[in-house]
Image (tube, helix red, strand yellow):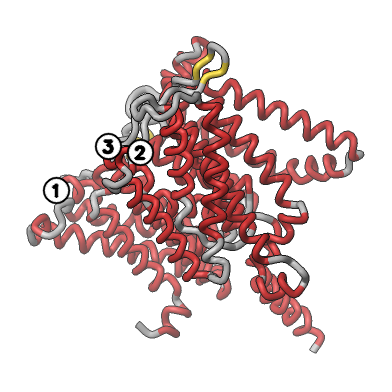
Amino acid sequence: MNPALTQRFPGIRLGLIGGVSLVLLSLIGMVETFNQREIISDLISMGQTLLLLTAVFIAYLAAKRGREHGRAQVFGASITAGLIMAGMLTLLVLLGQAINMRQVFINASPVLFQILIFQQEELWAGIGLLLLAGALIGFSAALLCLLPHWLRRVITTGLCSVAGVGLLQDLIAPILSDWSLLADFTDLLFPGNGLSISGAVGLFIVVAALSALWSFRGQALQTRIKALPPQSRRGLNFAALLAGALVMLVLPQVLGLFLSEVMTIVGLYILLGLGLNIVVGFAGLLDLGYVAFFAIGSYTVAILTSPELGFFDWNFWQALPLAVLFGVLAGVILGVPVLKMRGDYLAIATLGFGEIIRIMVLSDFLRPWLGGAQGIGKIPKAAIGGFEFATPQEIYYLILAGCALVGFISWRLRDSRLGRAWMAVREDEDVAQAMGIELVATKLLAFATGAGFSALSGAIFATKLGSVYPHSFNVMISINILCVIIVGGMGSMPGVAVGAIALVGLPELLREFAEYRLLVYGAALMAMMLLRPEGLWPEATRQRELHEEEDAVRASKLAEGSAGPRS
């Protein structure tokens, strides 16, 4: 295709990209599988929502690209993209009617084609509705692009809240039903499979109103808070911190057993993410063997506490310091041979270290001490006095204490002399060394600190499950933790929590769709690289660095525009 044509008419290229994406989502089975759950009862399903959100996103990008050429181009590009996407789905439906596609694509079923043509008995009536839907999606995306920023945010926030509540209805409805005062409200909101139409409209109005209120009053409120005396600001921060701590303490009792289990898994990833954030986010050392330290902490606690092996009879609290110590030592051992490596070479070397640990655990030679492929069981639970951390609602508090400790240490290290040295090494090792920073000690401390945090998480993981197995420590754990940091924001501690919730918590809540987890990971990472490369909750310095070029281009355009009339 002619590059000049696609640049002048961005709706063509983006429409083709969106059409291929929609066809792919349909043929891999996501649309049909997700269609079993309704977002709004008798109106729109989760599968249709998936197609709709993808189409709106692509059409909005087309409208945004066309904004440089005027309002007419915005509507033209967006509607063109919408029609092309609908046209490619139409071709899929017609092809499915002409030949048996299930010999190649098992998910190309009649049920899928009925979903695409809106359950219409007449094929051409359904195709007409599909093309009309494409045009309406393009028109709506163009309107959304032309709206003021605050109004666009209000509308998208309200719609996303409806989609999110409808998606998580099986979890939200039981929680609300446990409160007798909210039982009638729950029946009104969730009459069956999905939100009621009145409930969806009411939820949209409430969330949109709150978003609009924040848009108009939020900046003024932040300004007033910044204008407070330092002592008053500290008191306000302490009160907010105390309120957040109280909410976190009562959360398991409110959410129940299943959601408490999800929070424990998210908490473990936050612990791991905070450790890897020091190595990758602060010091800029790409470590793909991070799971090895997680395994070392788990196996140390298992060997010292499990009666199955019979070597020791320690409790969890006696074994925990030794597990962290062994993790720190392993971090130093890993760091020494890779001190001269950077970038891809460092990633490959650390990946090899992680595989070495996994193979050693699986080896027959170490089986009498490490259990081999059968692992180690009968690991006792952590206990304080007569209180035992046994259920997910109890283990949650152990993990919360670990996250609080590791978060506090990371926060203190970030602005310390050592933290600034790590960030200098991340920016440029040669310049950092020229400024007098000792690279050997700085790198080894980064590896050791991150490894210690990972071993702490591994120790809690072992006592949580009561057993450890080698397959729990494959390389995908390291990759998942790295994804959490990238999506949350490299070097950002709040970003680690946000990334863990987004990439670990949400898939755990939707276990019935677990086969598409890796696809969602890939799509989320691609979207992050394109739309928000700094992450969901970025570090301020990194955000400025990533947007320096964009700001420079914008400033030059403004300068040219202001200089035009004078000339």
Q: Which structural element holds mark 1?
A: helix
Number of marks in the rendered image: 3
| Among the two numbered marks 1 and 2 on one chain, the one whose residue lies closer to the N terminus | 1
Q: Nearer the viewer, mark 2 or mark 3?
A: 2
Q: What residue lies at 18% left-to-right and 51% top-to-bottom?
A: 107
Q: CA distance from mark 2 to mark 3?
A: 12 Å
Q: Amino acid at mark 3?
A: Gln
Q: Nearer the viewer, mark 1 or mark 2?
A: 2
Q: CA distance from mark 1 to mark 2?
A: 56 Å
Q: Position of residue 488 (x, y in %)?
A: 56, 51
Q: Image quarter for residue 20?
A: bottom left
The residue to which callout 1 is attached is 110
The residue to which callout 3 is attached is 374
What quarter of the picture does the N terminus occupy?
bottom left
Dot 2: few (<14), some (14–19), or many (≥20) neighbours within 10 Å?
some
Q: Which mark is residue 27?
A: none
Q: Amino acid at mark 1?
A: Pro
Q: CA distance from mark 3 to mark 1?
A: 45 Å
The residue to which callout 2 is attached is 369
Q: Amino acid at mark 2?
A: Trp
Q: Position of residue 80 (x, y in %)?
A: 39, 68
Residue in front for this viewpoint, 482 or 489: 482
Dot 3: few (<14), some (14–19), or many (≥20) neighbours within 10 Å?
some
Q: Position of residue 224 (x, y in %)?
A: 84, 41
